[in-house]
Amino acid sequence: MTGATVLASALGFAPGTALALLTLAVGVLFVLGVPILLVFSTWVLGFAVLFPAFGLQNTSVAAYYQLWTFPLTAVPLFILVGALINQLQIARDIIGLSRSLAGWLPGSAANTALLTSGVFSAITGSNAATTASVGEAFTDELREEGYDPVFSAATIAAGGTLGIVIPPSVLFILYGVTFNLPVSDLFVAGTLPGLLMLIGLITTATVISYRNDYGTDEYAFDVREVLRSVLKARNSLLAIVVLLGGIFTGVFTPSESASIAILFVVTAEFLSGNIRGTAFLVESVRLTIYLVGIIIPVLVTSIMIQQSLSFLDLQDLLSNAILALDAPILIGSVLIVVMLLSGSVLASIPNMILVAPLLAPAAFALGISPLMWGVIFMISDAIGFITPPYGLNLYIISSITDIDYMRIAWGALPYFFVLTSILVLFFVFPELNVLAA
């Protein structure tokens, strides 16, 4: 391939061979556990050396222009909303509301944990934050009610998958920015699949709990108790209304909705007498800066890799190879398998930015719209959180419960099959998601 540098020639390698060796080297680094940012950065810099069209001086320019986009300002704001919710201990009111709604079902605490995950997801937009918060809140209660520890951990990990599908989702914001799709439309399109995922998880937990006699009959459905719980959790519920209502109605952009939600949460909690001092704000901002410092560099390097792969025409090569199967059922099966595999080995941002555009042409050929493709891919990415070897939610809950990672993975299999069924359903019948029209 033309354009290789003198360095590659001096080493006696053709450009293609040098690129293959570079890819192999970073693959080894990935397997050895080197942080993903360093792995991707190594590949980007190596590619820039091999191909002058992407010179080293262009990397800083590319990074600057990738960040020069208004919708990205929503990312730290949404993270800050979730951090404030945790720091102000609003979680206890959310748990009370979830218990009044789901505590009467077989598997009372398990279903309460799942419903709490759904509400948390509608505030934090993060799988990791949801898994960690719900795990800390419910691990002891599940143990006290006699649940199998592995089942309890697997249930909490599965509930965390809702964090990137139920709006507002940080990953939907990044996806919209990267692929030039309206973030508000992605939020709307993710609502129905997210709710169906929640219903599927609760149904699975209910069946397993009923068969194993898990849970307690201490709770009963009481409309008055539900109303009391709604009143106690009014600040968090109104925060969700502010966040999503402004976006869905088109009154606010995602960034504006998140800003207003921050102001609302702090003001409401202050007027309720729940704020004493500023320590909560300092800690929330510190956590937000930390997470943004992790997310944004990975986002930038992932986009650079995607641009490099486009330069090599890898997207066309892969899509043509898949479309050569010449049978919709085969093409669809390959796409689903590749999505599940990539989600199980790659972190969310690299997976979304690198794999989604590579598979997109084949998906579009099957009649899936760009908007619905984003939703479908996000569901597959969410499933990766409970699928080894990546399985971020499995790692999080394993560290909280001190249960072996692989034991939790086995325990999560029923949830994996249910979520995969939902993925296949929307892949085969994307028109079912009427909100994505």
Image (cartoon, rainbow, N blue to C red):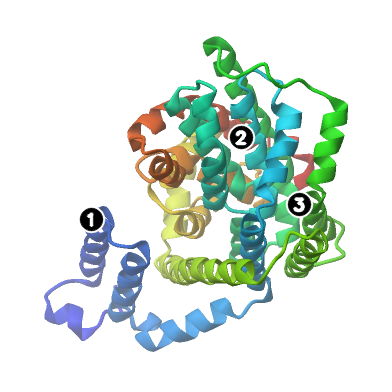
Which of pointers 3 and 2 lies earlier in the amino acid sequence? 2
Give the residue drawn at x 23%, y 55%: 32
Q: Sequence-wise, which precedes: disc 2 or disc 1?
A: 1
**What's the distance in space between the residues labelled 3 and 2, CA to CA?**
17 Å
x, y percentage for residue 175?
A: 60, 60
Dot 1 amino acid type = Leu
- Decide if residue 152 is on the left or right side of residue 309: right
Dividing the image into 4 quarters, which one contains the N terminus?
bottom left
- On screen, residue 182 versus residue 22, left or right, reads right
Residue 429, numbered label: none
Of 279 and 362, the residue lying toward us:
279
Residue type at numbered disc 2: Ala
Quadrant of res 81: bottom right
> Residue at (82%, 49%) from the top-left corner?
234
Q: What residue is shown with label 1?
A: 32
Q: Earlier in the sequence, mark 3 or mark 1?
A: 1
Mark 2 sits on what residue?
113
- Please state the horizontal and vertical placement of residue 415, each as a whole percent of the image: 52, 29
Q: Secondary structure at mark 2?
A: helix
Neighbour tally class for label 3: few under 14, some 14-19, many 20 plus, Cα within 10 Å: many
| 10 Å crowding of disc 2: few (<14), some (14-19), many (20+) | many
Label 3 SS: helix
Above or below: residue 357 compared with residue 52: above
Above-or-below relation of 131 to 145:
below
Residue 335 seen anywhere in this rendered image of the structure: no
Q: CA distance from mark 2 to mark 1?
A: 35 Å
* Amino acid under disc 3: Ser
- The answer to which of 282 and 112 lies nearer the viewer is 282
Say the numbered circle drawn on residue 236. 3
Image coordinates for residue 296, horizontal then vertical, percent: 51, 70
Q: CA distance from mark 3 to mark 1?
A: 42 Å
- What residue do we see at 36% from left, 35% from top? 403
